[in-house]
Amino acid sequence: MRVAAAQLVSVAGDVAANVASAVRAVEQAAAQDARLLVLPELFLTGYVMPPPVVEVDDPVLAPLDHAATAAGVLVLAGAAVPTAEGVRLSLLSFGRGVRRVYDKQHLVEGEVPHFVPGDHGVVLDVDGWPVGLSVCYDGSFPEHARAAAQAGAALYVNAMAFFAGSEHRRDLYYRSRALDNGMYVLTAGLVGRCGDAEFNGGAAVHDPEGRTIVSGPAGEEAVVVAELDRRVVESTRAAHPMLADVRDLGGVVHRSA
């Protein structure tokens, strides 16, 4: 399967402008035969607090769904979405109708007053590939990616918005998640200014041993594409079976030296 990761500038509060940018990204991904395109965290509404929100059935989203459907590309894009429980920091899918498919489970300090955290992980079937979903801070927790891998994920995707200056941690987190679990990891990130903050991009695809296959240029908008092979996941997990060998360690005992 060919997959695409985007690093794009989001215009705070201008959903229509961000949808138009997303449509252009779909066209770039489709031109390279990608079947999945991941856009950054809160891309559609902008990463600002308090966040603007968009309903899943809002007609402003229709051009992106139409473009994804016509291109045969499943698109995952971040948005702030109102629900009965409160506003969720969500991933929406486009190309098979607009659906809210995942809610961010780990909120950073500035998000906590504005969002209700998700309460479960998601593995999404994309052309027969089990794809674990995550949003930004989720990927900082090895347990989150491990849960997706144990649920069968061969690819773990993260829609993110990392502030400028955090490039080292950003790259180390997601290469580690790949190596920990013997699976591909795809990241898509905001780049440039949104509201009062500057973001550092980070669109990339890492192989199951944590090697970077492709990455976006620093500081620029881009859509990068990589070819994934399930046999690489299988052979890597056979050679490095940490996922299969992990044990219940039974807690930790404190002793005096």
Image (cartoon, rainbow, N blue to C red):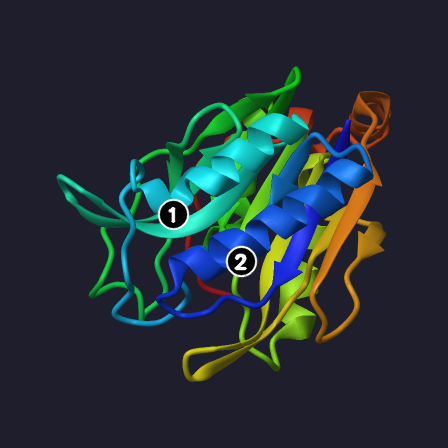
Q: Which residue is drawn at 53% across and 28% down?
A: 95
- What amino acid is found at the position of numbered circle 2 in the picture? Met
Give the SS element for disc 1.
loop
Give left or right: position of 11 versus 75.
left
Q: Which of 202 and 247 is in front in this view?
A: 202
Q: Which residue is drawn at 74% across and 47% down?
A: 28
First of labels 1, 2 by sequence position: 1
Residue 196 visible somewhere in the drawing: yes
Residue 208 visible somewhere in the drawing: no
Dot label at residue 88? none
Q: Position of residue 83 (x, y in %)?
A: 19, 41
Query: How dense is the environment of label 2, judged by Cα within 10 Å: few (below 14), some, or many (20 and up)?
Result: many
- What amino acid is found at the position of numbered circle 1 in the picture? Lys
Q: Where is residue 74 in the image (x, y as percent from the top left)?
A: 59, 31
Give left or right: position of 178 versus 198.
right
Q: Can you identify the residue that label 1 sits on?
A: 104
Dot label at residue 160? 2
Q: Give the image quarter of residue 183.
A: top right
Rendered position, 47 above or below 1: below
Point out the image quarter for the N terminus: top right
Q: Give the image quarter of residue 9.
A: bottom right
